[in-house]
Image (cartoon, rainbow, N blue to C red):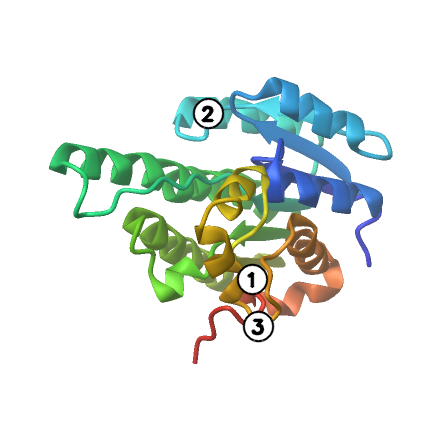
Amino acid sequence: MNIQNQRVFISGASRGIGRACALKLARKGAQIGVHYHQNEAAARETLKALPGEGHRLFQADIREETQLEQMAKEVFSHWNKVDVLVNSAGIYTEHPIESVSASEWMEQWRNILSVNVLGMAHLCYLFGRHMMEHKQGRIINIGSRGAFRGESESPAYGASKAAVHALSQSMAKKLGRYGISVTAVAPGFVETDMGAAVLETERGDALRAESPFGRVAQPEEVAHLVAFLADSASGFLSGGIVDINGASYLRM
């Protein structure tokens, strides 16, 4: 894969899918910008684990526009050219309609959309404009199967991921003329550190049974797909939404 010496910025890289992407791409010779919000200790552990040189931490609250803009300036000052943006930062919280108040319902919608949609859209803008200047780049957004099947316990999450997919396709249509490829990845349930707790409950067996493989995805499997999409040879996949859910949900 042609990832050697590529400069890759990954939002939400301190843990989960983002961390797995950082490790995978660094092993292939990329320089990684590790973004985190609050968990500096976890971000530094990720940074320490990355092979190679040229990696760096970047901090910002993805919900705060001024923080994102200042961070982007720092990224572009550190690297004259960023080749790949991986938008992995996202949140999931449950707010079933039958058991939350109207105020909590709306608060959950605001929180989830501010991170999963508005924060990602802002990063797409900042890095997309930067890539336009260089007439090349890759943007890979982490979506979810929940965009297609619905999320009854977290409808705001399902809606946010549908927006991620639509954002990705819209950006792909606009940025292709600048040599920029935009794709989305739609995982099913992934055994991250947060997901592991759910898998240990009575819901775990049901989640594993959703796939004919009898298990859920590992973060490294999603990272493998992201690395494939980051390769310059994969550019004509632009506009695609690539499922990686172990046949737990099939869309026609």
- On the question of residue 239 being in view, the answer is no
Q: Residue 236 appears at what percent x and percent y?
A: 64, 69
**Looking at the image, do the residues carrying marks 1 and 3 touch, with CB atoms under 8 Å apart?**
no
- On the question of residue 126 being in view, the answer is yes
Q: Indicate which disc residue 176 carries.
A: 1
Q: Earlier in the sequence, mark 1 or mark 3?
A: 1
Per the image, label 2 sits on a secondary structure element best described as loop
Q: Which of marks 2 and 1 is nearer the N terminus?
A: 2
Residue at left offset 58%, top offset 58%: 216
Residue at left offset 19%, top offset 47%: 97
Name the outermost residue toward the left: 102
Q: Residue 84 appears at what percent x and percent y?
A: 66, 46
- Quarter holding residue 183: bottom right
Direction from residue 117 to residue 143 in the image, left or right: right
Direction from residue 76 to residue 116 in the image, left or right: left
Q: Which of marks 2 and 3 is nearer the N terminus?
A: 2
Mark 3 belongs to which amino acid? Pro
Residue denoted by label 3:
212
Name the outermost residue toward the right: 52
Q: Which of marks 2 and 1 is in front?
A: 2
- Quarter holding residue 73: top right
Residue denoted by label 2:
61
Mark 1 belongs to which amino acid? Gly
**Looking at the image, do the residues carrying marks 2 and 1 touch, with CB atoms under 8 Å apart?**
no
Q: Nearer the viewer, mark 2 or mark 3?
A: 3
Q: Which of marks 1 and 3 is in front?
A: 3
Direction from residue 174 to residue 244 in the image, left or right: right
